[in-house]
Image (spheres, coloured by chain):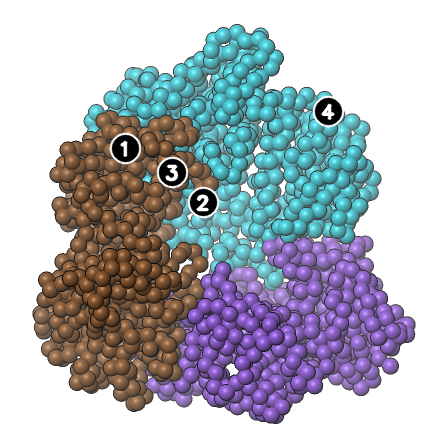
Chain colours: A purple, B cyan, C brown
Amino acid sequence: MEKNAVFPKLNGLAHGGDYNPDQWLGYPDVFAQDIDAFKKAGINCVSLGIFSWASYEPREGEYHFEWLQHVMDTLYENGIYTILATPSGARPAWLDKKYPECMRVDAYGIRNHHGDRHNHCMSSKIFREKLNNINTLLAQRFANHPGLIMWHISNEMGGECFCPECIAKFQEWLKVKYHNDINELNHAWWTTFWSHKYSCFEEIEPPFWNGETSILGLNLDWKRFTSWNMTDCMNSEIAAVKAYNPDIPVTANLMNFFNGLDYREMAKDIDYVSWDSYPRFHNDWETFDDTMRELACSHALFRGLKPDRPFMLMECTPSLVNWQPYNKLKRPGVMRLQALQAIATGSDTVQYFQLRKSRGSFEQFHGAVIDHAGIDNRVFREIAQIGADLKKIAPVAGTHLKADVAILFDWDNRWAIQDMKGMIYDDKKYERVVIEGWKEFNRAGAEIDIISYNDDFSKYKVIYAPMLYIVRPEVAKALTEFVKNGGQLLCTYMTGYVNETLLAHLGGFPGEGLSDLFGVYSEELDTLFPSDRNHIKFADGTVCEVKDCCEVLKVKDAEILAAYTEDFYKDTPAVTVKKHGKGSAYYYAARVSAKDMVPIFEQMCKDAGVTLEKMPETITRHVRYGEEGTYHFYLNISNQSAEVCAVKGTDLLTGKAVSGNISLEPYGVAVVKAE
Amino acid sequence: MEKNAVFPKLNGLAHGGDYNPDQWLGYPDVFAQDIDAFKKAGINCVSLGIFSWASYEPREGEYHFEWLQHVMDTLYENGIYTILATPSGARPAWLDKKYPECMRVDAYGIRNHHGDRHNHCMSSKIFREKLNNINTLLAQRFANHPGLIMWHISNEMGGECFCPECIAKFQEWLKVKYHNDINELNHAWWTTFWSHKYSCFEEIEPPFWNGETSILGLNLDWKRFTSWNMTDCMNSEIAAVKAYNPDIPVTANLMNFFNGLDYREMAKDIDYVSWDSYPRFHNDWETFDDTMRELACSHALFRGLKPDRPFMLMECTPSLVNWQPYNKLKRPGVMRLQALQAIATGSDTVQYFQLRKSRGSFEQFHGAVIDHAGIDNRVFREIAQIGADLKKIAPVAGTHLKADVAILFDWDNRWAIQDMKGMIYDDKKYERVVIEGWKEFNRAGAEIDIISYNDDFSKYKVIYAPMLYIVRPEVAKALTEFVKNGGQLLCTYMTGYVNETLLAHLGGFPGEGLSDLFGVYSEELDTLFPSDRNHIKFADGTVCEVKDCCEVLKVKDAEILAAYTEDFYKDTPAVTVKKHGKGSAYYYAARVSAKDMVPIFEQMCKDAGVTLEKMPETITRHVRYGEEGTYHFYLNISNQSAEVCAVKGTDLLTGKAVSGNISLEPYGVAVVKAE
Amino acid sequence: MEKNAVFPKLNGLAHGGDYNPDQWLGYPDVFAQDIDAFKKAGINCVSLGIFSWASYEPREGEYHFEWLQHVMDTLYENGIYTILATPSGARPAWLDKKYPECMRVDAYGIRNHHGDRHNHCMSSKIFREKLNNINTLLAQRFANHPGLIMWHISNEMGGECFCPECIAKFQEWLKVKYHNDINELNHAWWTTFWSHKYSCFEEIEPPFWNGETSILGLNLDWKRFTSWNMTDCMNSEIAAVKAYNPDIPVTANLMNFFNGLDYREMAKDIDYVSWDSYPRFHNDWETFDDTMRELACSHALFRGLKPDRPFMLMECTPSLVNWQPYNKLKRPGVMRLQALQAIATGSDTVQYFQLRKSRGSFEQFHGAVIDHAGIDNRVFREIAQIGADLKKIAPVAGTHLKADVAILFDWDNRWAIQDMKGMIYDDKKYERVVIEGWKEFNRAGAEIDIISYNDDFSKYKVIYAPMLYIVRPEVAKALTEFVKNGGQLLCTYMTGYVNETLLAHLGGFPGEGLSDLFGVYSEELDTLFPSDRNHIKFADGTVCEVKDCCEVLKVKDAEILAAYTEDFYKDTPAVTVKKHGKGSAYYYAARVSAKDMVPIFEQMCKDAGVTLEKMPETITRHVRYGEEGTYHFYLNISNQSAEVCAVKGTDLLTGKAVSGNISLEPYGVAVVKAE
């Protein structure tokens, strides 16, 4: 285990999950049975108290921590560590009844009734006071417990609130951002349009669905504010628990490509990134291979939020979930494959939701390590196997991945694209373009990071920045520097249309000087109806199908690589490159499939000196590098056996030396420590 | 006519419908014309006053019953009897304006505006007071009218209310159910999950859509309460009208497989069950045969609510409705076929909505016996034919059907399945499974009752209990007794998962000892995506296609009849039987079409000694048994002629003796009194 | 230019569009650049101030008209005229904040938040006062400006409000309509149905979605009231601006087949009709030809609102819009074709939304004459071409079209059909039937007006009145007169079902004596499911497919032209005619495609002596007649070249004499002044 492993106390990788013993206080045998099962399954940590506020404080001011004390003590005595949650994931009924301002107000201005989970007002002073009180009591008592290894702040944060307290806070936030100058805001949001000009900050309301939804700058700032406000509330929780022991790290469990919060901002304030992963395996719209590669892309997203340290797979289901439209079982071996893929892509943990099925309520039929009927079943046996495997590959803990290729993905660009009026109005498919690009470039043999346009580009040799709609001057400058320093850059249609407050760049797209970098102007953006098609043709005769959109370009001083074959812009340029020394700036004006973009990508890698390690079709490879060794993960992401060539080292899972070809069974994995 | 006929005064079957002469008070000729038409059509009873509150009491405290007196008197003088409604089907505008608490509050907590029909608060004290007042005045004056033969309580009751009075009443109802012990409720609903624990009953709100929707036990109890509260309101109406003449029976017109109320509970408090039947004939998604068999299934449902007495076909349209997506005319002969099918399956009445078209408003183009343009038209002539036919088969009145086969169908099981989180999330198709089972087993030659899991099973030899998700101990015991006494029982996937408050059975499914009865455990429930398929194969080589879901079984001591052919549970058991003496407990772990389940059903009937009377493809047969005779109904449910063999007796419709084969014209019917 | 041209000051046709210089006050160079561009493009008028209330009055009582003065002055000095809007299209934020009653209340009774645009309460006294104030100030200062040529009242009016002020006003409106007699209203709306009877006008609420939606007469009167109230508010604006110079004409920009307002009533109060036109060119569900003919039909609709004078094409996009689901570019030449089609069909203007792209907010990517990057682009060059063309055809201004054929289309009939309960419940396709009829009859060679059933029929020789559901006695009489005077009339299924308040006609359909005119009764209306088909067969063997609906007829004294071929009404009449001297009354009982109705239409034209000028397939022709000449427009509505025969005169666009065949390039146009 390397020194930057997430949990030094565990001497390796974490294996655990959400556990709710407070649901079973009336069933005295259950806790002992569970500990026994945990040991059988190699569970070394549990997440406690995620929804326990009503157990801690069933009536205002009446506290019950004794059960938690007993649970943490007993677990610790049995070698099992605790990740303890702050209980803001759901509120007790008495709180909402007495202080209705704790409940959110919806986008029509109607206050919620009490219920469900993630729906507290992030601004409510009384809510924050009550939350701080329970967090402080929890920290006072448990922050120095020897079994405690991490705080888990709230649960899957998200959502908006349109209450008066939030509105006032938004107005204050805007005052700071716009230097208390309403005219600055009016210009930034271009409010003269449709007579939207404000005379003072107090007139500004959030985008109520039956109110002001048409100021794009307002919409975007509201999303930024909501994200900031949620983060601010999170930080108040972090402060409360760190006050009693600053050495205990904190995390927050994030959600896959979640739209509602700017995770890049949020990640700055937590010690480790963790996420909850619920892919839809074995579905009827894509191959298993596609599902697995998309999952690897998600891991890259979360890994990229704090690139200097391992992330955590905080939740996944041991068998099935119960809230998707079709709740299918994971096939035998798939949970193990998923677990080892997480480690392969940079996680130091494999954690489940949930360790024991709850007897009633919403998730009673969600998969769990321990079933209603106990542990004599396929699912438990597979989990126990994973527990054993994780012990075998424990040295991997704390190691890291390396990538020469990066894809840019940012939340405010995403929000801006979603709200952009034009093109395909309801779905511009930005996320899909990012993910499909990741998958196909990965299939071509690359390890790829997903980074922000605010990150340092100099670590990379090849950058793909699709649909870089918002461009600020410093980003344009950094991209230009990157290319001038020999970097390979690929951008697409819809690049550089607007600035940070969504004002269109004047003087032509892509703006902020990028038209010089690429040597092209985009004169028009054409959108295709669903059954419309165009094509582009390269010099070598390759023809690719175009859907969705085509930019009509004016080339200034770029080389034309491909041209349209149809419609009024037939024979005009569709793909161009402009060389800047060893660097290249590619512009792809039409939407083709990510697969069809691979040749350009391969050329970029070649020119950048990046070696693509192409694997057999159903094999993915990831490498974790540490001071004590290099670990090659070979994952067979199919239900057929497959061969991998030219492997050399020791397979930690079998303990055997391997040299030359190895065969992987369906869904099989090898973790080879290189010689 | 047998002694248990619904309306002794009518000397046979009732022929009538909804009639609204108060709409025509300003058209003096219309009433006389209508009576003339009724006589021509053999109409012997009418339903009056269903929406007449504003006619009775146009302003608070100002009453007008004189028009009703005149109508009932004149009808009676002309030999036509009255079914009189209580007027709670819709409220006058002055009532809602003065007492807004009479109007319901919706699931977001917003009070309705005045309008439409079925939307009074069932709890409102002022509403009940006002309703009691008008009902009392009506009963005082008309309960002993010689023309009155029945009270029709309200109209097509249904719906929910989330107002403060309903909330308080719900809390009281819960206190009674849970013995005033909030901890009992907390355990029953497993509220520790997601911090939902209540500290007192006053904290409990109904499942507001912007509130608490995730406690399954709460959701189910709220449905039970709403059904109980509606029934309670109905009972207050019954008490008001029975006070002046307890001998007049009451009914309430129910709706086809209506989801909102537990009709089994409701039926206990009325004297006769009646229902409103609006099948979609001649549609473009199923055969006419299918439509007719599904309609027979519906009749079986309502017949089963009070199995000891005939039911009533309270409403059907003489030609078309005007509120379905496509409002197609019934083809010539189909109304007659539908009328005689109702009698064949146990109804003692054929009643229409409506006798005369209303000149304006919502249903002005709904079919009626009397058209805007009078009675010189096809529809009226067909109704008159039915009137004549009903007189010919009058001896059938008061007779009953017999069935050895039953299908279980219960409302709380249905609600629990709908709200179950898992499997196919949005549509588990419970009703469809019940109906398709009924249709195919009927096509195989069986008369089938639809009963509750609380009913006495000993009357039956074969029971099909699909998706018996909720199992209480006494139900498990009764099913076990049934099998041990020689009964043939067929259950399926999703049997015995939860108890009455939706807590999962611990120790394995099916719970409550049923795994001993069937000799199997269900270890996992796999759900298939829409285009996924599996198959099961029987020993004789028969292969059936599987959709939607598959349970993975552990067999303890059952015989395996079929196994899966694909996927990781290939070759594991899919259909089993465990014999208990002469009794058998079949378990069907996969969802196949009802047609594919027929061989098992036939085997069960054979083993139970139940004779299946298989008819030609488009003929259905039902038999009504009375003290004075046995009546065989042969219905040709197709638009082609068909032959029936080996008939012997007198066809009451033709008055002729029949012996041997008879031919039925398209949509034709024979009613043969057996020799 | 004829004397009844819209803008005498322009000496020909107007070329202009919406212009928002107040958005660019902080960009001093822009205005001068724009004027330069306008001159290059032949722009001679602009529409100003449509959303400028917040620019005029940024705080209550603080006024800024100086920028407008500068803009109008400078434009005028450069030969560019102004159409000045009243600014009620959107309200400043301070107004809604201080006077929330200016904001509408929605159909659930919830008041809007501030935002978007067209959402003021039309009844609010304070809103009208504030609006009158700003309009008065505007008119005082600018009504006599030499550059002012028209007032543009508000913008794209529409929508409903359910606030207390509107409810009270509705009740007053009903009192007037129903002579302060609640019983008259009760009868007219047939409120006895479902106990809807009112005891006083104060009990009446509008059709709240959670209230009274089932009284059809109420629903229709509410639409009439809303339309009247919007018109009333418009009239208050007109009065304010006319007070200072009654000679300046007013218009209001209408929307294509807009459902929400009775444009026939509204048009009476404005001087010129103008409309905003956003067809979806090059889509993937119809041919370009279809799109263009439907657009011509829309022009006919607006032309018909004030048949004695030219209309205005107030808005269209120079390239694309940004709010449709797929925002495709107009292909080269299509904007010009569209512009010249507008002139061909009776417009005296070609105006765009927008002259310059707004830098931010909702429409920043909507097409414009001047792009973010300036005017060196395809779009601007095409606009400049149009500017030049319009100058060449300037003599057309003020001329008019002639038509012998009319189609009836009325808003209250439309609303009544939409709300009619029956047939296909959700979509009776009335508008589609009107439009497809227009297109096919136009393709057959006819110029067609779209008129009201209240218009003078004597101007026409052939009238098509599909689905004339509402028939008042005077309309029945006028149609009868029309036929008796030799007119050719074609009606269809669903004719004459109800009167003006939606009471069904008693005594048979079509009512009000029309069954005598046609010689038929409609006994039943059958609706077909989507995949159902029937057919009708004519004496000459022609067979046409029937979808959606079939009436079953009783023929009294009409000639039968076609009969059904299937179902129970096989061989019964489907199409009939009754001759009245030279006049004919055709009845088409089944829904066939408009194309299949063309032979009947051609027969009618032949009998009426109307010559059909059939063009080559992709050519449309329109003729404008003036005192100084006759102008034949030939439009090639395809992307292929096409020939037109037998043309004689001078092509104004080329300046050349033409005689015999002319060839039109793809999307090409010839405007031939006849010799």
Tell me the residue that label 1 is attached to: C576
Task: Name the chain letter of the residue that bears numbered label 3.
Answer: C
Tell me the residue that label 4 is attached to: B606
- Residue B105: x, y in percent? 41, 52
The reply to whether the C-beta atoms of the residues labelled 1 and 4 are less than 8 Å apart is no
Q: Which of A35 and C642 is in front in this view?
A: C642
Do callouts 4 and 2 point to residues on the same chain? yes
Task: Name the chain letter of the residue that bears numbered label 1.
Answer: C
Amino acid under disc 3:
Cys
Q: Which label lies toward us, 1 or 4?
A: 1
- Residue C346: x, y in percent? 21, 61
Mark-to-mark CA distance, 2 and 1? 49 Å
Residue B353 vertical position relative to residue B118 in the rendered view, above or below = above
Amino acid under disc 2:
Gly
Do callouts 1 and 4 point to residues on the same chain? no
- Residue A541: x, y in percent? 60, 72
Tell me the residue that label 3 is attached to: C544
Q: Earlier in the sequence, mark 1 or mark 3?
A: 3
Q: What element carries label 1?
A: strand
Mark-to-mark CA distance, 4 and 2? 44 Å
Q: Residues within 10 Å of mark 3 (few under 14, many from 20)?
A: many
Label ID, residue B504: none
Amino acid under disc 4:
Lys
The reply to whether the C-beta atoms of the residues labelled 2 and 1 are less than 8 Å apart is no
Q: How crowded is mark 2: few (under 14 residues within 10 Å), some or many (20 or more)?
A: some
Label ID, residue B159: 2
